[in-house]
Image (tube, helix red, strand yellow):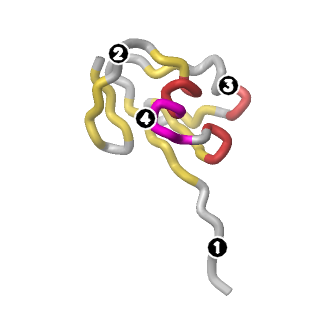
Amino acid sequence: MRITVNGKPREIEGETPLPAFLRAYGIDPRLVAVAINGDVVSKTEYERACVRDGDEVEVVRMVGGGAR
């Protein structure tokens, strides 16, 4: 299956639950925000969300810091 992750094409074996998808890329699901096809996935929905053929996935890591 073909998907897009942060603007880059990727191949996955099949429909994959979001937490398993993130772990496969070495990403801690607690430390990111995810949108699938432009819709932000609430942390409470992670277990029910799946990545499917043709999906566009955006993964944003939280970064600390800022201006002083």
Q: CA distance from mark 3 to mark 1?
A: 28 Å
- Is the residue marked by circle 3 packed among few (<14), some (14-19), or many (20+) residues within 10 Å? few
Label 1 vs 2, first from the N-terminus? 2
> What is the magenta range?
23-27
Label 4 vs 1, first from the N-terminus? 4
Query: Is residue 66 positioned above or below 49 on the image?
Result: below
Dominant SS of magenta comes to loop
Task: Identify the residue at horizontal 73%, vertical 28% (top origin).
Answer: 44
Residue 1 location, quadrant: top left
- Is the residue marked by circle 2 packed among few (<14), some (14-19), or many (20+) residues within 10 Å? few
Residue named by callout 2: 13
Residue named by callout 3: 45
Query: Is residue 31 positioned above or below 21 on the image?
Result: below
Q: CA distance from mark 2 to mark 3?
A: 22 Å
In the image, farthest residue toward the top: 14
Q: Nearer the viewer, mark 4 or mark 1?
A: 1
Q: CA distance from mark 4 to mark 1?
A: 25 Å
**Type of the residue with mark 1:** Gly
**Type of the residue with mark 3:** Glu
Residue named by callout 1: 65
**Type of the residue with mark 2:** Glu
Quarter in which the C terminus is drawn: bottom right
Q: Where residue 57 is drawn, which disc sits there?
A: 4
Label 2 vs 3, first from the N-terminus? 2
Q: Is residue 56 left or right of residue 41?
A: left
